Image: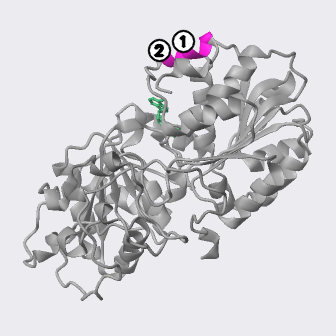
Amino acid sequence: MTSFNDFGLAEPITRALAEEKYVTPTPIQIDAIPLVLAGRDVVGIAQTGTGKTAAFALPILNRLATNRKPLEKKSPRILVLSPTRELSGQILDSFRTYGRYVRIQSALVIGGVPMGRQVRDLLNGLDVLVATPGRLLDLLRSNGVRLNQVEVLVLDEADRMLDMGFIHDIRTIIAKLPKERQTLLFSATMPREIADLAADMLRNPARVAVTPVASTTELVEQRIILIDKSAKPALLVETLRNEPIERTLVFTRTKHGADKVVRALHHAGLSAEAIHGNKSQNQRERVLAAFREGRVRTLVATDIAARGIDVDGISHVINYDLPNIPESYVHRIGRTARAGATGVAISFCDNDEMPFLRDIEKLIQIALPRTERRTSPRSEPSPHHRPQQNAGRNGRNGNRRNGQQQPRSGNGHNGNRHNSQQQRRPEQAHQGEQRRDHRPAPAAASSPENIGTVAFMRQPQARGPQSGAPNRNAR
Ligand code: AMP
């Protein structure tokens, strides 16, 4: 399967894909599209950036193109649930882009904007409705929408919906759907509640999996700069000035932190905008549009706000704060290196964040290259992972050629390091720590030992819902 023509999709869809310059399907598309076309329920383990939106949107559009039906009032034929307003908007855009020659009626139902227009959009029925769960429930209760005509349900980023407390809403919504339907569930991880949901809601689902949670999309160069907390603002300014940045996403742990960073950048004469949950929907859309169009090169975001931001050409991700949940690190750096591009992830780590760094390295099973710039480094306990052989030196595609995945243990946290080709010795990776003087080191460290890569690896076999992805709710 090397071309989109091999799927037998309707001509109006392949025409749109050709115009979008989609030539080669991604692994999740290769696996999922034939299954969805065949009418199977599917559980897909995949993160954003793997092409999963097209993996469900294309076969759904094919159904709509080849099986036209009169629309019923207030009723969608296809319902897509997603956790955030931004992601919902992007999913709808994808349907409209790939379906531009299919003539579909589609609409968005999200919170934070007036309900009246959404009620009007629904009045005459829809082919595709993309919704966040809270607003959809409001509309259900006010009789603005009926769900008894839904033929296909998609739950996208199901684990994030769980994190955001939507699981109960989702169950309420699903109870209103016809029993006879096709259900597709996509999730980056498979915590127990999502596995249970899948077991309850899907019929004999096929399972497809393309990225273990511990790997990232394609190839991301990763660097850690150990730095005093107080020196982070200056380091950020220095990094933004020195790095060959096209677009950068800067992550902070808190909304307040994001605003503070933006103020510091403005103070230094750099343009930047923040995006987080305290901003109105209008503000968020304005900022995202400016970022997409290149008018703002630096976007400062919190994890939740950034989830699902689908902007191509993010050359750098900067972790101003390290996340305390290691999986968030993987999600964050996956914002760059999308659709085969390369990207750089630079993480600032202060003394207090050293435990977070160790958790991240434990999860991804790579000792990340570090540059020491703290004035008073706190002595570290020896790394808990056993020495590994160097993988990064094999060339950037070395792992790919091997066709093997990063070794992981059952719970994804304690590697059973049997695959020596994928690994590197922490002491090699940490050569940057040799630098003990207090002069500033170049932020854009470019020597090979300062570049770590995580290769995207296709899972050799589909994994079951409980096949070992860490259960973040157990935390
Ligand atoms: P997603 O994982 O759905 O968020 O997709 C990530 C990005 O990859 C989006 O910008 C898509 O437009 C792009 N994309 C998806 N599939 C392909 C493909 N087969 N070829 C090129 N780009 C793609």
User: What amino acid does circle 1 point to?
Assistant: Arg
Above or below — where is 272 with respect to 196? above
Considering depth in this image, is 443 or 138 the residue closer to the camera?
443
Q: Position of residue 445 (x, y in %)?
A: 15, 58
Above or below — where is 90 with respect to 96? below
Work out whether residue 372 can be spotted. no
Q: Residue at x 35, y 79 (%)?
A: 385
- Bounds of the magenta span? 11-18
446 to the left or right of 162: left
Q: Within 10 angstroms of label 1, few (less than 14), some, or many (20 or more) residues?
A: some
Above or below — where is 73 with respect to 102? below
Q: CA distance from mark 1 to mark 2?
A: 6 Å
Q: Position of residue 211 (x, y in %)?
A: 49, 51
Quadrant in the rendering for residue 106: top right
Q: Badge 1 is on which residue?
A: 15
User: What amino acid does circle 2 point to?
Assistant: Glu
* Res. 118 mark: none
Q: Position of residue 32 (x, y in %)?
A: 62, 37
Considering depth in this image, is 263 or 220 the residue closer to the camera?
220
* Res. 19 mark: 2
* Residue 83 falls within the magenta-colored stretch: no
Considering depth in this image, is 416 or 240 the residue closer to the camera?
416
74 to the left or right of 15: right
Q: Residue at x 79, y 16 (%)?
A: 67
- Numbered disc 1: secondary structure: helix
- Numbered disc 2: secondary structure: helix
Considering depth in this image, is 356 or 6 the residue closer to the camera?
6
Whether the residue carrying mark 2 lies under 8 Å from ligand 1 is answered with: no
Dot 1 and dot 2 residues touching (CB under 8 Å)? yes
